[in-house]
Image: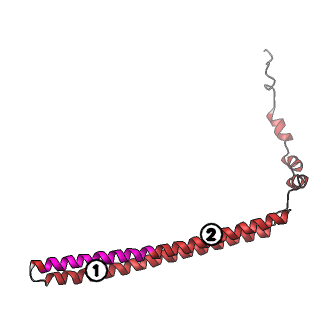
Amino acid sequence: MAKSNNPFAEFDVTKMMVAFDPTKMMVAFDPNKIASQYKLPEIDVNSLVDYQRKNVEALTAANKMALEGVQAVAKRQVGILQETVATATEAMEALGKSGSPQDAAAKQADLVKQAFEKTIANMRELTELTVKSNTEATETINNRIAEGLEEIKAQALKMN
């Protein structure tokens, strides 16, 4: 049998694996030694935890405001629906009592005008509720971002 020219043909992987000791590698790779070599600043873990806690609190508060806003809009929509049903019932009774076709047409035009104006007012009210809720939630997040940036700046200045 001819000898192979491949230098890896007789390579025994099992011998390499027996000799492999990852703990020896970790002695060489000591993150603390590397950090001290390059004089990396120490990180204040308590400040970091406090920073993240404040972020979570701000998100929680913003979510609560948003949920309360959604609930207020939904509650108002139910109220509007109830008002609309009551108004439509009254309108149908009024139209049924009209005398001539001309009176019915005049009443119908007046009812359509009132319904249109009421719809616009309701839409405006719902929009204002939504905008108010979104603004409050957004301001909470924006304030936290500004505070967080100041905290990061303060920590960066401490590291010098």
Pinpoint residue 113: horizontal percent, then vertical percent: 26, 76
Q: Is residue 140 in the magenta section?
A: no
Does 125 sit left or right of 109 as displayed? right
* Secondary structure found at label 2: helix
* Label 1–label 2 contact, CB within 8 A: no
Q: Give 130 or 24, whichever is nearer the viewer.
A: 130
On-image quarter of the C terminus: bottom right
Callout 2 crowding tier (Cα within 10 Å): few <14, some 14–19, many ≥20? few
Q: Which residue is mark 2?
A: 142
Marks 1 and 2: which is nearer the front?
2
Residue 11, position in %: x, y? 81, 29
As shown in the figure, which amino acid type bears the numbered disc 2? Asn
Question: Residue, x 75% and y 69% (percent of image)?
Answer: 151
Q: Local crowd at mark 1 within 10 Å, few (<14), some, or many (≥20)?
A: few
Q: Which SS does the magenta portion mostly show? A: helix
* Picture coordinates of residue 59, whole percent (x, y): 61, 70
For residue 153, above or below residue 77 = above
Q: For the magenta stretch, what is the residue range?
A: 103-127
Residue toward you, 122 or 59: 122
Residue picked out by circle 1: 85
| Residue in view at x 28 percent, y 83 percent | 86
Q: Amino acid at mark 1?
A: Val
